[in-house]
Amino acid sequence: MGDEGNAGAGAGGRPHGPGSSDADPGGGDRPRRPPAPSRRDALRGLERELAAAGRAAGVEEARLEAERLVAYVLGVSRAELARTGAEVLGAGEARRLARAAQRRLAGEPLQHIEGTVQFRELVLASDPRALIPRPETEQLVDRIVAWARSRTSRGRPDDPDGVTSVRRRPGSGTPLLDSALDIGTGSGAIALSLVREGVVRRAVGVDVDAAALEQAASNRASVGLDEARVELRLTGPRAWSAVGDGERFDLVVSNPPYVRDEEIERLPVHVRAHEPRRALAGGRDGLDVVREIAAGAAAHLEPGGALFLEIGAEQGAAVRELLGASGAWEEIVVQRDLAGRERFVRARPVVSAGGR
């Protein structure tokens, strides 16, 4: 696409070139100003550009992304955009849309351009400080909600291995669990959702990245929670350095870095160039952080508690073997996501004869 002042026939919708101007009807040589494009014209042009860019820019649904970008630039909802498609796009709006389109076509994630991401019931800040929460992580929280319900006498006894969404609305009753530890909290999406949806009374989120914790703190404030409900801690090189020896939780959860080092450079540009590498890279086999979590989590779980992990789609067998070989875990279950890929692991600490 051209520079931001000339939206071309794409995002700005204006034709250009030698054939785009007619003679002045008054007989002069001054070219006639081309008609201003409508919002609908701009949307169609941007959709074509995004479709052409395709996976090189990480675009999977060109129509949806075009609608979101145009709506974002205009400050309207997608529904309002559909109702007002015939309205003329102003010159300033066309320039702003051209800038946003250039950023997206260069591979910048749509969520970073919009500045927010929807995660379950929450709207969170989105920028390069933390990994963008994915739909699979929403499903991880669904699994936790189902397990928590099955563990208590409150609510219906959901199948903890089911894949049906089981979201709890804010203020939906007494929390199912007292506490949770979210390792590698990043944006805070998991910890904040668990507390806001009434799954746990309080959560602790730990991360090695101070910038990510800044984003998590901003998100905490924006969703109406405070440090008493969601505590954020900076860890040292090891995740457990921010957790006291005697601290126990009903739940330990993590969406850890699990991409193999050799795969990092093959990731799409919108991930590789715009999301924090330390939130992605999991070592030679992708399981460095998983090993660290598995080695310490059992000692920090209350009786009846569980560990939940999100993992790579081809890591199920390796993680099951890793947990089993440690001797600290039993009832190790690998669960599939909605696309049928092995994506989540749930495990329970081994209970000794003396009762942990």
Image (cartoon, grey):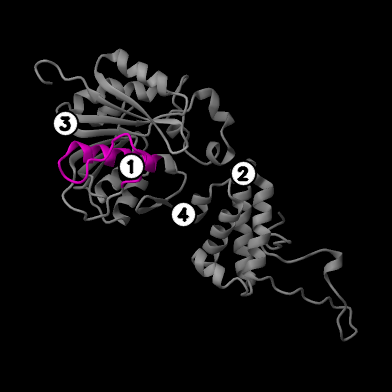
- 104 w.r.t. 159: above or below: below
Marks 3 and 1, the one that precedes in the sequence:
1
Type of residue at label 3? Answer: Glu
Q: CA distance from mark 3 to mark 4?
A: 35 Å
The residue positioned farthest toward the right in the image shown: 27
| Circles 3 and 2 in contact, beta carbons < 8 Å | no
Q: Secondary structure at mark 4?
A: loop
Q: Which mark is residue 142?
A: 1
Give the label, 2 or 1, closer to the camera: 1
Residue at 19% x, 36% y is 151
Type of residue at label 1? Answer: Asp
Residue that carries the numbered disc 4 in the rendered image: 115
Magenta stretch contains residue 211: no
303 displayed left or right of 82: left
Residue that carries the numbered disc 3 in the rendered image: 247
Residue at 46% x, 20% y is 285
Type of residue at label 2? Answer: Ala
| Circles 4 and 2 in contact, beta carbons < 8 Å | no
Give the label, 1 or 4, closer to the camera: 1
Badge 3 local density, few (<14 within 10 Å), some, or many (20+)?
few
Q: Look at the image and give the residue range highlighted in magenta.
A: 137-166
| Circles 3 and 4 in contact, beta carbons < 8 Å | no
Q: Secondary structure at mark 1?
A: helix
Q: CA distance from mark 1 to mark 4?
A: 25 Å
Residue 209 falls in which quadrant of the image? top left
